[in-house]
Image: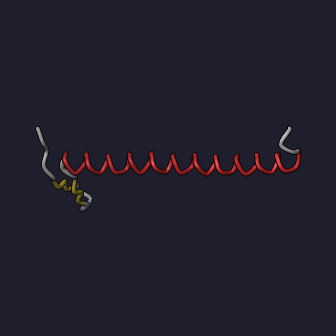
Amino acid sequence: MNKKRYQEEYEEGSNLLWPSEEEDKITRKFYRDLSHLSKKIEVNKVSNKLNFIKKIIVKVLGPES
């Protein structure tokens, strides 16, 4: 069953427009991909910082350490 977009009205006067199942799947996939991308970027930032620290240690202590 594929639900269509629908509107829900409440007594307080607020109206909510709910997405269809198709729109919901696309939105969830977008945010999942965005989350994975941001995690990958964070890992790269940490990796770059560690590489920088390793280079400093090698310069200070020498390549033999």
Q: Name the residue rendered at 65%, 50% in the picture.
A: 48
Q: Name the residue rendered at 38%, 45% in the picture.
A: 32
Q: Is residue 20 left or right of residue 62?
A: left
Q: How is the image coloured?
A: secondary structure
x, y percentage for residue 60?
Answer: 88, 49
Q: Is residue 13 left or right of residue 37?
A: left
Q: Residue lying farthest left?
A: 1
Q: Is residue 19 left or right of residue 31?
A: left
x, y percentage for residue 42?
Answer: 57, 49
x, y percentage for residue 31?
Answer: 37, 50
Q: Name the residue rendered at 25%, 45% in the picture.
A: 25
Q: Quadrant of the C terminus?
A: top right
Q: Residue lying farthest right?
A: 61
Q: Name the residue rendered at 13%, 49% in the picture.
A: 4
Q: Is residue 58 left or right of residue 16?
A: right
Depth order, front residue of 57/12: 57
Q: Residue lying farthest bottom?
A: 13
x, y percentage for residue 16?
Answer: 24, 57
Depth order, front residue of 51/36: 51
Q: Quadrant of the N terminus?
A: top left
Depth order, front residue of 12/46: 46
Depth order, front residue of 30/41: 41
- In this rendering, the count of numbered labels is 0
